[in-house]
Amino acid sequence: MIVQIRPIFFSFLGLMFGVYLMKLFHYDSPWFFYAFLIVLGIFLICLLLHFAFRKNKIFNYLFSKKLLLIVIVISVALGSSLYLIAQSLYEVDFRPNEDTYYGISGTINTNYIQTSNGTYFFISNVSVYDESEIINLERNMYVYISNVDGAPPSDSELEKILPGNQILFTSHITLTLVFDYDEIDDFAYRNNFQHTAYVSIENIVVLDGKMSFLDSVREYIRQMYHEHMSDRYAGLAFSVLIGDRAELAFDIEDNFSISGIAHVVAVSGLNTTFIMMLLLWILNRFRINRWVKLVIVGLVLLFYALLCDMTPSIVRASLMSVFLLIGTLFGKQADKLNSISLAGIVTLLFAPLYIFDLSFLLSYAGVFGIFLLYPVMQKVFKWLKYKKLIDAVALTVSATIGTAPLIANTFGYFSVVGLLANLVLVPLFGYAFMILFLVTIVALIIPYVAYTFTVVQYGFWLVDKGAWLCASVPFASITLPSTRDFALIGYYVGIFCVSRYYLVSSKTKFISVTLCFLIYFSGIVSSYYILYNSLLI
């Protein structure tokens, strides 16, 4: 046997490849033609080799798995179809004249986010008033408040920019296309908007409205944090729990990024893992029935996912956690690779363009890195002797290897101190987060408990100072250029070849891994070459 077959896993890969392939085809990119020729060439070569070497185990194995090949083909076709459906759903419903001022009204549906360049938020139920007609938009609108003379709007000016409030203003409107030439605007897709308005804060009229239940809960939590913590750590706590970075201090975000622990402020599988650990520890203490345990965990994760606005990473993590728990309830060892793949399939069926979303990719890359490399890394670091230390190092290295090329490709750097920071600060963050989550849930029912947040913030203070210390180390990060998609694919195929799911002789495995990483490094070299030539020009 060459590869441990996981039909769900290969279906997930086929679905992603189908979406990606149709993106190339849609824009008439020559890469689609090249990809088609490459796949066809590989198939013909394999077919010839199969007949020439009928006793060869590899080719006999490949052609004996007809059912798997059919599943993959169907998955690729389904992925391509989902891309076309998404394209049809994002037909532009209103093309504004960029020289015209329009009257605009809508309901704020997110908290505002402050950046170094300005402040933005989203509105729904948008109506655009032209001279001759009223146009009701089907999607959200992105409202951007530019800084005036380099200064952001004051807190007093922004105090009414809250979910549920109605706003009125006049502005130019620009069209923001999800399908923009040869790129997918994942930010527009994730936030479901097609139009952008730029406005100054003094031109916005805000009318008090009614918050939804979930918005009310979020606002109540935010107020509790600010009442019992300093503003700095209230913003950090709200960010790590809800994923809302509106009040996250800029220097915290920078320090976390440079030290390689930025994922702790992005609601993801790390959060649901800590929540699962906390819930199962409590439920096991009370000897709760396993089916009741499943219902409780499922409901808590559903509520948490809704509270976090159903971001791609939290949806994946919640689904995977539930699938893993279901597997254990039937008395079988849960197949982690299939569980995460099934979660990915469910997510892509409803949002196929998430494969171009960085948070989605990082979330899956990190978890796949752990599932594929963790056993290998345990053997690599067995010289450390202490099991808990071996497990911690193996887990951290596996996740880092899984996400490193995507981070370098997107942000242009790799954190040198990331391994150490993750080993020390992430476990510390885990304890602080679990206590924060537990106290928050209890405080929603018994408000008096909120006074303990004063103590909770000391855990975040330690994480904050640790990240600052790591980020202050000289050469804490190194600059890397972006590389091509083929190089990234080669890298992740190489990770799969390293894993226990690729069952071949040591020699064959070494050759396969070497070839895959040569492809990746050739992509890096070509990127440096292109960058060097551009600088010369």
Image: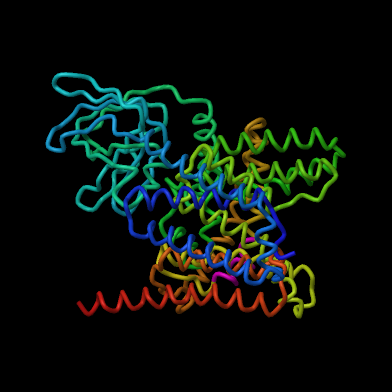
- Name the residue: 48% across, 52% down: 232
Where is residue 237 drawn, in percent x and y? 54, 48
Specify the quadrant of the image occupied by residue 61: bottom right
Q: Quadrant of residue 450?
A: top right
Q: Is residue 126 above or below residue 376?
A: above
The reply, left or right, for residue 47 in relation to residue 139 is: right
- Identified at 58% across, 56% down, the residue is 460
**Closer to us: 343 or 164:** 343
Tell me residue 521's x, y (percent). 47, 76
On whether residue 420 falls in the magenta region, the answer is yes
Q: Nearer the viewer, residue 31 or 53?
A: 53
Residue at the extreme front of the image, as rendered: 51
The span shown in magenta is 418-426
| Residue nearest the observer in this picture, 134 or 529 | 529
State the image coordinates of residue 33 (x, y, percent, origin top left): 38, 58
Task: Give the quarter of the image for residue 536.
Answer: bottom left
Q: Is residue 233 visible?
A: no
Determine the residue positioned at 32% across, 52% down. Answer: 28
